Amino acid sequence: MARNTKYEALKEIVAEALARGKPVQRIAAMVGVAEDSIYRWLKKPEIKTLLAKKRDAYREKLIGAIEVDASWQSKAWLAERLFREEFPPPTQKQEHAGPGGGPVIFKCEFGHGQAEENGRAE
């Protein structure tokens, strides 16, 4: 297959895979071309346009699937992303402390009964 013919045959497949978030490395292996070829293709205006169309279509498909999903979690996820000011995602803060809020003490053994204690972990 000539280079230009191979490009023509694969550009739709590559654009669809990229739009769905697959990494270039996996796509290259899937279609049998070098990663460099895909990166070169991505510089072409026609591929940029095709990829934008594929991403828009995939976005609509995902939103449609979330809208008909019975779980409230999928709707909360979508609301957090579409209406961030009204539905900010929950924040998580993790702190580690020892007994009574003091430092975390850990003990490392190095064989032959030798041990070392360390103070507070940050």
Image: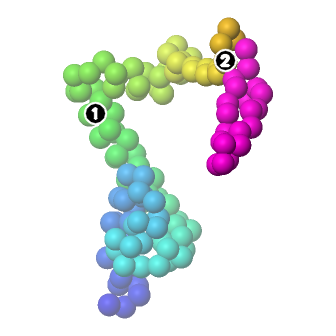
Q: Residue 107 in the image: state x and y as whole percent.
A: 67, 33
The quadrant of the image that shows the N terminus is bottom left
Confirm whether residue 73 shows in the render. Answer: yes
Badge 1: residue crowd in 10 Å (few <14, some 14–19, many ≥20): few
Which residue is located at x 66 percent, y 48 percent? 112
Which residue is located at x 41 percent, y 66 percent? 26
Earlier along the polypeptide chain: callout 1 or callout 2? 1
Q: Which residues are magenta?
A: 102-122
Q: Residue furthest right?
A: 119
Q: Is residue 33 above or below residue 25?
A: below
Residue at numbered disc 2: 98
Disc 2 marks a residue whose amino acid type is Gly
Q: Quadrant of residue 113?
A: top right
Q: Residue 6 in the image: state x and y as whole percent.
A: 36, 82
Q: Residue 10 in the image: state x and y as whole percent.
A: 34, 73
Q: Tag 1, which secondary structure?
A: helix
Q: Is residue 2 above or below residue 48?
A: below
Q: CA distance from mark 1 to mark 2?
A: 47 Å
Badge 2: residue crowd in 10 Å (few <14, some 14–19, many ≥20): few
Which residue is located at x 73 percent, y 20 percent? 103
Whether residue 118 sits left or right of residue 70 in the image: it is: right
Which residue is located at x 34 percent, y 46 percent? 57
Confirm whether residue 46 shows in the render. Answer: no
Residue at numbered disc 1: 64
Q: Nearer the viewer, residue 94 or 117?
A: 117
Which SS type dominates the magenta stretch? loop
Disc 1 marks a residue whose amino acid type is Gly
Q: Is residue 30 above or below residue 116?
A: below
